[in-house]
Image (tube, helix red, strand yellow):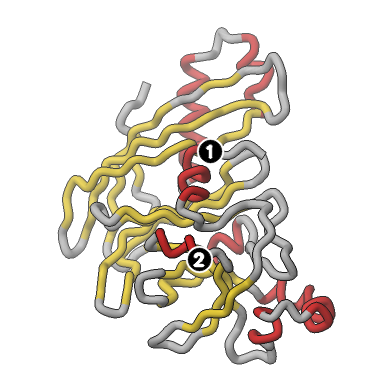
Amino acid sequence: MKLSQLSLLAFTALVAVPAMARTAVLRKDPKTQQNYFLSENEDIKQSRLSVGWTLPQDEDFNFEKIAANDESYINANDDKIREAAVNVLVDLKTGSVVEELDQIKEEFTTCVWYLDQGCNHTGIYAMYNDTTKLAQVIGEGKWDTRYVSLEVMNETADGLVVRAKTSNIIPIVKNDLKVRLDSEKNSDALYRRDRDSLSLMINKISATAATNSAATTTFKLKVETDLEVAKGDGTFSASPVLDYVMNLRTGYESLALELVNKK
């Protein structure tokens, strides 16, 4: 599996590591009393945000047995657990659950871990910038980035609270890259041959807050990408950079991305 700079940064912060065996450690939101699981690695506390997972609190799940790696209980309920599980964004400073990541479950996957079994060739990561208050939630497959959501946070006494966020920006980035490369590389025989087989890896997203009001927050984004054919030799590859202006309305989920460097 090729790791982008995004996932390498997340790895350094020990957020959610793909295809890595980990034990589920039971935690509880101090305000809501919601049970959830985090990685056993204590170094995870170096980061403000992490990705954990949880189960419906009103159903008959034994959180303690899962945390204890009770093999007989987990094996008997494995399918039920995986079907019901949802990843959560956790504020490690306060121990609070910021939100349940329902959208990434619908569009990509849910990552759970127990019995020293992690996610198979997938990873869900979270990164947070204390200066811009912008979080990135990233879902990566074996060969490509499948999901990226950008979320503006408010910092409260109880922890981080989502102020506004995008839905998955990957479809927009893919389309903008295709439009650009169709224009720039139309005469490139390798590109024409491999065009529909290219995998997209989001390498890095840099964000600068441009304006900030009660109703709208505007960011300038630089999205660095890698495009290549998975496991391909002698194939087309490129590393385009896209610049966007992103407008987020408080209290809404939106995809207000405007491409700046149109060519």
> Which residue appears at 60% of the width and 91% of the height?
58
Dot 1: few (<14), some (14–19), or many (≥20) neighbours within 10 Å?
some
Nearer-the-camera pick, 195 or 202 = 202
Amino acid beneath label 2: Glu
Badge 2 or badge 1: first in the primary sequence: 1
Q: Is residue 33 left or right of residue 31?
A: right
Give the residue displayed 27% in from the left and 64% down from the top: 250
Name the residue at 25% across, 78% down.
157
Give x and y (percent) for residue 94. 36, 75
Residue 173, placed above or below residue 68: above
Quadrant holding the C terminus:
top left
Q: Quadrant of residue 59?
A: bottom right
Q: Looking at the image, which residue is at 52% across and 28% down?
A: 178
Q: Relative to 102, does residue 222 appear above or below in the rendering?
A: above
* Quadrant (top left/top right/bottom left/bottom right) for the N terminus: top right
Horizontal and vertical percent for residue 207?
Answer: 30, 43
Tag of residue 42 = 2
Can you identify the residue that label 1 sits on?
4
Vertical side of 76 occupied by 235: above or below = above
Q: Is residue 224 left or right of residue 200?
A: left
Residue 123 or residue 163, whichever sits in front: 123
Q: Position of residue 79 (x, y in %)?
A: 79, 73
At label 2, counting other C-alpha atoms closer than 10 Å, the crowd grade (few under 14, some 14-19, many 20 or more) is few
Give the spatial CA distance, label 2 vs label 1.
24 Å
Front-lying residue, 116 or 201: 116
Is label 1 in a helix, a strand or a loop?
loop
Three-letter amino acid code at the position of disc 1: Ser
Marks 2, 1: nearer the viewer: 2
Relative depth, front residue between 185 and 67: 67
Element class at badge 2: helix
